[in-house]
Amino acid sequence: MEYILRYLPFEGHVHWRQGAMLKAVAPYTARQCWGGIIMPNRVPPIITLDDAAAHKHEILVTIPEEDFESLIVGYLSEETSIDDVRRGFESGVWIAMKFYPRGATTNSKEGINSWELPFHPALKVMEEIGMPLLLHAEANVDESTGKEIDIYDREYRFIPVLEELRKLYPRLKISVEHGTSLEMAQFMEEHGDPKKLVCTVTIQHMMFSRQDLHKDGFQPHMMCYPIPKRAEAMMAWRKLGTSGKPYIFAGTDSAPHPTHKKESSCGCAGGMFTAHAMVPLYAHIFEQAGRLHNLEEFLCINGPRFYGLEPRPGLVTLVKKPWTKQSMVAVNGGEKIRPFGYHEEPEKRFRFEWQIKKP
Ligand SMILES: [Zn+2]
């Protein structure tokens, strides 16, 4: 069985980091997609326009052999300069700004509190110039009590902030990244709009629920943020994700955490590495949902359109031919990343159904 995409895939949300890690992981995305949104929570994060330009340059010199358009995102912080936001967007150095709730996820200590977000001075400018705001849509601290919000409740507790943003900045382009909760799926179904309010959905949030995270003991390699929710929430995202709606698109949130940080006695790093099988895994999910016919919009069309880019024509033939991932991803310097589907015991490896047919 074959399935043909008439456009090239686009990655709506990926973590590449820097240095040796960047070199090890970026080619996986670049070989499947023509372009993608590169997240800014490296160490240190991409806060200034100079940081962004330097990162873009680092990518270019690290993977010169890849034909890939890296779309850089700025990290919204208290230090963000309004002048940088405007100049960087207008000159094409960065394409969007990303909100990280302070302390909620990997490298987010320079982020801002969710209740302060609507008053960040950059938003007015972004609305005016048409620059998207990407949301790690979680409220991790309660504004009135100062107490931490339960990890399973953080996404739906962010919805009031989202409503306030929409009220204060009616023309602001907003993307809710990696949706996971039932409430957010319902909110998107009601308010999603391909020009103004979109969302990305990851592979893992359409495949796994918190039941899987705790199956046969805690599974550190499945741990990711936002934390997977109940099975009903996963089903809601699978339904919405594969629905063909123009306001939803692929964003793997693939994140390269070395195994020693995932298999650690003192907390495991949140994030899954799925970039090596992005297209096969989304095809797997869409086929299982009986909606392979919606895959092209989701993978190739809706993302670029939201960012004001033309979807890129090109033939990609997907072929149904099972395979397994037989090795870890090696990083120069000795670290290793465990890609989704790999297992030391061959019989426990995930059976990928689809692959991209080599020309
Ligand atoms: Zn992410």
Image (spheres, helix red, strand yellow):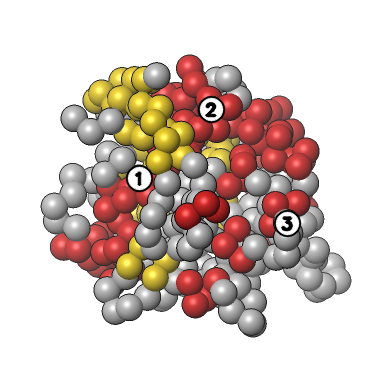
Q: Is residue 109 above or below residue 221?
A: below
Q: Please name whichever residue, 201 or 131, is drawn nearer the observer in this view of the structure.
A: 201
Residue placed under numbered mark 1 in the picture: 36
Question: Residue 194 appears at what percent x and percent y?
Answer: 52, 28
Q: At numbered mark 2, what does the secondary structure look like: helix, strand or loop?
A: helix
Residue 29 in view: yes
Residue at the location (64% across, 52% down)?
137
Q: Which label is found at residue 215?
A: 3
Q: Is residue 229 above or below residue 20?
A: above
Name the N-terminal-most of marks 1 and 3.
1
Name the N-terminal-most of marks 1 and 2.
1
Check the picture and name the quadrant holding the N terminus: top left
Residue at the location (64% across, 29% down)?
240
Residue 106 appears left or right of 70: right
Q: Please name whichever residue, 216 or 6, is drawn nearer the observer in this view of the structure.
A: 216
Q: Amino acid at mark 3?
A: Lys
Residue at the location (69% across, 40% down)?
234
Q: Amino acid at mark 2?
A: Phe
Q: Quadrant of residue 311?
A: top left
Q: Quadrant of residue 18?
A: bottom left
Q: Amino acid at mark 1?
A: Gly
Q: Which label is found at residue 286?
A: 2
Name the N-terminal-most of marks 2 and 3.
3
Question: Residue 26 appears at what percent x and percent y?
Answer: 30, 56
Mark 1–mark 2 distance (CA, rounded to whole Å):
21 Å
Residue at the location (60% across, 25% down)?
289
How packed is label 2: few (under 14 Cα within 10 Å), some, or many (20 or more)? many
Q: At numbered mark 3, what does the secondary structure look like: helix, strand or loop?
A: loop
